[in-house]
Amino acid sequence: MSRPTSTASMSADPRAVAGLEGWPPPALDPAGPFAEPVSVLSWVLLAMGGAVLLTVLLALGLALFGPRRWRRRLGGPWLVWIGGLAFPVVVLSALLIYGLSLTGVLSQAPAPGEMRVRVTGEMWWWRVAYLNADGREVMQDANEVHIPVGRPVVFELDAADVIHSFWVPRLGGKRDMIPGRRNVLRLQADAPGVYAGQCAEYCGGPHALMGFVVVAHTPEAFEAWRAQRAAPARAPVGPLAMRGAEVFASAGCGACHTVRGSVANGLAGPDLTHVGSRRTLGAGILPNNRGTLAGWISDSQAIKPGNRMPAYPVLQGRDLQALAAYLEGLR
Amino acid sequence: MTLRRIPISLLDERFPTKSRRPAGELPELEEIWCRPKGWGWFTAINNNFVGVYYVGAAMLFFVLAGALALLMRTQLALPLNGVLGQETYNQIFTVHGTMMMFLFAVPAVEALGVLLLPQMLGARDLPFPRLSAYAFWAYLIGGLAFFASLFFGLAPSGGWFMYPPLSSSTWSPGINADFWLLGIGFIEISAIAGAIEIIVGVLRTRAPGMTLDKLPVFAWAMLIFAVMIIVAFPSVILATTLMELERALNWPFFDPARGGDPLLWQHLFWFFGHPEVYIIFLPAAGAMSTIIPAVARTPLVAYPLVVLAMLATGFISFGVWAHHMFTTGMPRLSINVFSAASMAVSIPAGIQVFAWIATLADGRPRFTTTGLFIIGSVIIFTMGGLTGVMVAMVPFDWQAHDTYFVVAHLHYVLIGGMVFPMFAAIYYWLPMVSARPLSERLGRWVFALMFTGVHVTFLPMHLTGLMGMPRRVYTYLPGRDWELPNLISTLGAFIFGIAVALWIFDMIRNFRPFGDREAGDLHQSPGLEWVPAGLYSLRSIPIVKSLYPLWDQPDLKADVVAGRYLLPGSAMGGRETILTSAIEAEPQALLRMPAPSPWPIWAAVFTAGFFLLLTVQAYAACVVSGVLGVYCIMQWCWSLDLPVEAEVAHIGGHIRVPTYVAGPAGHGWWAMVITLIVAAMVFVMMAFSYVFLWSRNPAIWSPPPAHGVLYVGIGLYAGAALAALTACRLARLGRACARWSVAGLVLAADLVAGAWILDFQAWRDAGLRGEASAHGAIVYAFLVWQSLFVGVAALMAIYAILRLFFGLVAPERPTTGDLIGLFLIYSAGQGGASMLITHLFPGA
Amino acid sequence: MNGRATSPWRMGMMAALIAFLSACSDKSRPARQIAGADPSRGLELIDQVGCGACHVIPGLAWPQGRTGGSLEGFGERPLIAGRFPNQPGTLVAWLRDPPSLSPNTAMPPTPLSEAQARDVAAYLYSLDER
C-alpha cells in the first residue's frame, strides 16, 4: 500500500501563480529597468492622448452646439493651421525626441560578462539553453527561464521553424525570433517572482497555447538552483519509477527527448532532465503533476491540438503510470 | 491630326446655347444608353450599373467578413471556449482580415469612385467601361471562390499578412495558402484596372473648365488613391509572385537555409501594406471632405490645405512601412527614421480633422443620418489616430505590438477612417441612384448602435492588450483577468452586428436602383453629381467655373438638363464623352466609348477559372480556361480600334473636335503608360529584392555567365526596341508602310523572345538552379517576370497579324500599333535592365 | 513569492462563473451526498490539478483529454473505473490514490488532500445524465 506520493504542490498551477494575473495590466506594472521607463512613457502617452481627445471633442462640441459667436470664431482656416499643423508638430517633435532617446537607452548593446540565455522558439514551445562565458550551451531546459534578480540578462533569440516572438510584459518589450537571424534582448527583474511570457507572433496552429514563465531568484537562490540543475538527472527511486525509466527507454522517448545522465539524448523535443521541477507542462498551459504528465504522454493531441508530440495509445495503464512517476521524479 | 486648342473663354462665349434643341436628341440618348434587358444585366458596362454592382459586392463582402468577426468574438467570449476549433478559428481570422482589407475596403472605395466620378466630373462614363466590367466580375467571382474555400476547410490559416516561413509549403502544405494568393491575385487585377480607369478618368474626362483647383476633393482623393495603387500594389504583386514560386517550385526566396530571408517578405508586404491603409483612408477622407460642406451648408474650410494634406499623406505613407517591423531587430537608425515618419503621417490626418471641424463650425450642420456618421467618424478616427501616435513610439510599440492594443488601434482607424465615412457616403449618395432614400428614422438607430458597438467592442481591447493578451489567439487560459474585457468586446460586436442587420433591412425595404427616377438630393448639395440625370448621365456636359458649381452657378442645373451645354446628344450615334486636357480641362476630342459586350464578363470568368483551376491543380482545364480567356480579351479588343465614319464631330455651339486621337493625347496611350509604370515598379521592387538577398548572404552568389552573352542579349533587346520604334513611325506613313509596320512589331517581339531564351540558356549553362539558392531563385524570378512580357508580346504580335489579315491596319488609325510598340519597347528595356543587373551586380 | 494578493476582480469572476456552472448542473436529485463538501470548490480544484488532461468533465471547457474517459453523468454511474462500487468513501480514496485500489490503472495518485478529494467527489456527484 502506498500513500499518495505525488507531491507537486497545488500552487504549481500556472494559472494560480502570483505574477500571472492580468490586473494590474502587466505592460503598465513594470518589474525591471527595461519595463519601467516604457510604462512611464505609456502613462505619458495615455495622458496626452486623453488630453488631445478631450480638446478635439470640445472643439467638435463647440462646432456643433456652441454659441453662434464661438462657432463663427472656430470656423476659419486658423483652426486648421493651429490645431492641425502647429500644435501637432510641436507635440510630436517633443514626443519623438523622448521616444528616440528612450529607444537608444533600451537597446544598448550587451556588456561583456552579462549572463546569457539562448531561447529558441519552436512550434509551439521554447527551447532554453544557458550559456557559459564562452557562449557555449551548458544547460538545457524548456518553457521556463530562471534568472537572478538585479542584473541584466541577455537573451539570444533564435527560431527553429517559423517566426515567433519572445515577450515578458512585466520585464520589457518583445522581440521577434526569426529563422536565419539572431536577435538579442536584454531584460532584468528587480524582485524575485514568476513572470508570465507568451509567444506574440502568430506561429500557426496552437500559437495561443505557447506560453512560458521567467522565474527570478535572489542571487543566492539562483546559484543554488543552478547547482542543482547542473547535476545530471536523478536516478529513479522506488520500483514504480524504476519501471517508468524502463518504459521510457523501451517506448523510445529518448529519440526525441534528452535526460542527461541516461542514454536518452534526442533533440527534437524538450530536455526532460529536470522536467519534474518545472512549473508547467505543455508550454505554460497545464499544471505539472503525475496525472497531467500521464494525460499529456498518452494523448497530448487532445489537449494541445497540432503539437509535435504524437499520442501514445500503445502504453498499458500501469506503464503509463510508471512513466509519469519516473518523470515526476526528475527534479 | 494635330489637336487645336479650344480655350475655355471661347466656350464661355458660346454656352449655354440659346436655340431650342432638336426633338429627337434626348430619345436618341436614352436609346443609346438604355437599360439592359434579360442577360443584358450581366453585360452592362456603364458606370451607373457596374458602379452599383461594385459597391453592392463590396458591401456583401463586408457583411460576410463581419459575420466571421462575430464567430470569432463568440469563441473569445469565454476562456477556453469550444465554439470554434483551433484550425477553424485560424482560418476564420485569416479570411476575416484578408476579406476586410482586400475584398471590402479597397474595392469599396474604388467602387465608390467608379459609381460617382463620371457624374462628379461631368462625364458620361469612365474612359474604359469594359475594363471596369472585367475588373468587377473577376473580383466578384474570385472573391466568392475565396470565401467559399472556408466551407471546404481549404481556407488559408496563416494570417492576412501570410508571413513565411509559416506560409511556406513546409509549414503550410496543402492548397490553403494558395487560395490566399488566389484571392490577392484578383484584387491586384481589379485594383490596377480601377486605378488606370480612375487616373485617366480624372485627368482626361473632366468637364471643361474644371481645372485642378476646382476639382472636387473626392476626385482629388481618388486620383491620389489611384497613383498610390500604382506605386504600392506592384510590391505585393511581386511578393505574391515570389511566394507562389517558392511554394510551387521550391525556390528559396524566404528560406534562410538556402540564403533566403523571411524579412524580405515583410519588407515587400508592408511596403504595400501600410500605404494600403492610406489607400483605403484617402478616398473615404475625400468623401468626408465632399459631404461635410453639403451637411454644413458651407464651403470646405482650407480646401488647398486639405488637398495638400492628402498629397502629403500619399508621399509619407511610403516611408512608414517598417513600423510593422519594430520588433524584428532592425538597426536603430532605421527604427528611428520609420518612427519619425510614422508620427509625421499623423499631421496631415490632423489637418483634415480640423478642417472638418472648422467647416462644421462655419456652417449650420444638419443632423441627418449622413451628418451623424460624419461626426461619429471624426471621433472614432481621432481616437484611432491618437493610439497610432502611441504605437509609432518604438518603446511603446515593443510592448503593444501584436497585442489586442493594436487590434483596437487598427479597428478604430479603419472603422473611423473608412467604415463610417462609407456609411455616410451610402446615406448621402444613395438617393442619387435609388428611387427611395434610406429611412432617416432607422438610420439614426443604425448610427447609434454602430457607434455604441464600436466603442463597446474596441475600447476594452486597448486594456486587454496591455493586460498581455496577444493577437491571433484562438483561445486563452483563464486566470489572467482577460475574461471580462473579452466578454464586453463580444457584446459590443453583436451590437455592431445588429446595426448592420438593421441597415440591411432598410436597404431591402428602400433601395430601388436603376429606376426611371431618383430620390434626389436631400442636402441641397453643391456637386455636379446632383444634376438630374438619366442612364446617359448628364444630358449635356457643363462648363464648370467653381468648386461648388450648383451653389455658384445658379442656372447650371436647368441649362444642363435642357441640353444647352456641350455634347447635348450623341454626335456619332454611339456612347461618347469629351476628352479634355489634363491641366486646363479644355475639350480636345470626342471620346467614343464601347457598347455593352459579353466579352469582358467571359474574359473575367475564364481569368477566374484559370487561377482557380491552377489553385486546385487541374492543369489541363486550367490551360483551356487560359486560352479561352485570351480569346475573349482579343474579341473584346477587336471592336475597339475600328474605322471611323467621320474625322470630326460637332459637340454643340459650333464646336468641332476630332473623333480619333492617337499618341500621347489619346486615352489608350495613357492607360498603356500607366500599365507599364506598374510593370516598372514591380521590376524596381525585384531589383530591391535582388540587392537585399545579396546583402544578406553574399557568399552564396555564384559567378554570372561570360560577358559575351550579356553583349549579345543587350544587342538583341536594343534591336527589338529599335524595330518597335520604327514600326510606330512607319505606321503613320501610308497604307503600304502601315503593313510593314506590323512586320516591324513581329520582329521586335521575336527579338525580345530570342534575347530571353539566350539569357535563360546562359544561366542554365552556368549551372545556376532556382531551387539551389536564393541567388538562383531571384535570377530565375527576373526571367519568369520577363517571360510574362515575352508571352504577352507574342500574343500581341499574333493580334497585329490578325488585324493586318482582316484589313484593319490603316495609317489614320495607328493606336493599336502604337500601344503594341510601346509595350515592346518597354519589354526590351526591362529585359536589358534585368540582364545588366543580374550579370553585372555584384560582379564576378 | 512576491506576495501579490489575488485580485478581488478575479475572485468575483471565478465565483460568478462557478455559480453559473453549478446552476446548470445542480439538478434536483443528487445521487450521493458528501457532508460538508463544496462542489464548486471541487470544480476549481479539478481545473487546478488538471484532471481535464485525461477526462472530459462537464463544466470544464478545456482540456478535454481522451485518455481516461468522459465523466459526464458520473453521479449516476454504478461503478468507478468499471470495478468498484461508486460510493463516496471509495471515490474519495480513488481520487487520491487509484493505484492503491487498482495497481494496473493508468490513473496516478493525485496531489489532492482528503478534504480536497471530498470537494472533487461532491462535484462529480453533481454530474447527472441530463
Image: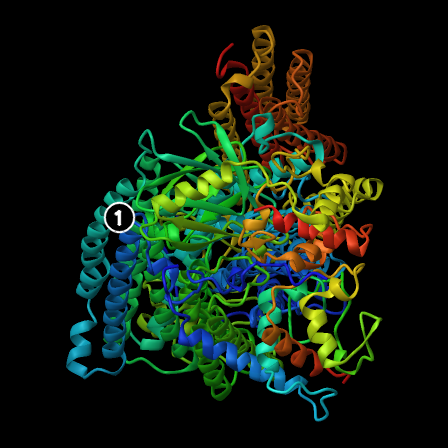
Position in image of residue B126 (x %, y %): 54, 56
Name the element at disc 1. helix
**Residue B211 visible from this viewpoint:** no
B819 or B308: nearer the viewer: B308
Q: Is residue A263 above or below residue B33?
A: above
Percent from the top left, x then y, of residue B256? 57, 30
The image quarter in which residue C58 lies:
bottom right
Q: Residue at x 59, y 47 (%)?
A: A275
Residue furthest bottom in the image: C28
Task: Check disc 1 and report the residue beneath it.
Answer: A99
On the image, the x and y values in percent for residue A141 come to 54, 41
Horizontally, residue A58 falls left or right of residue B672, namely left
Left-right relation of A316 to A224: right
In the image, A76 versus A82, the foreground residue is A82
Q: Position of residue A263 (x, y in %)?
A: 68, 32
Depth check: B570 or B254 in front? B254
Choose between B341 and C111: the one closer to the eye: C111
Above-or-below relation of B689 to B567: above
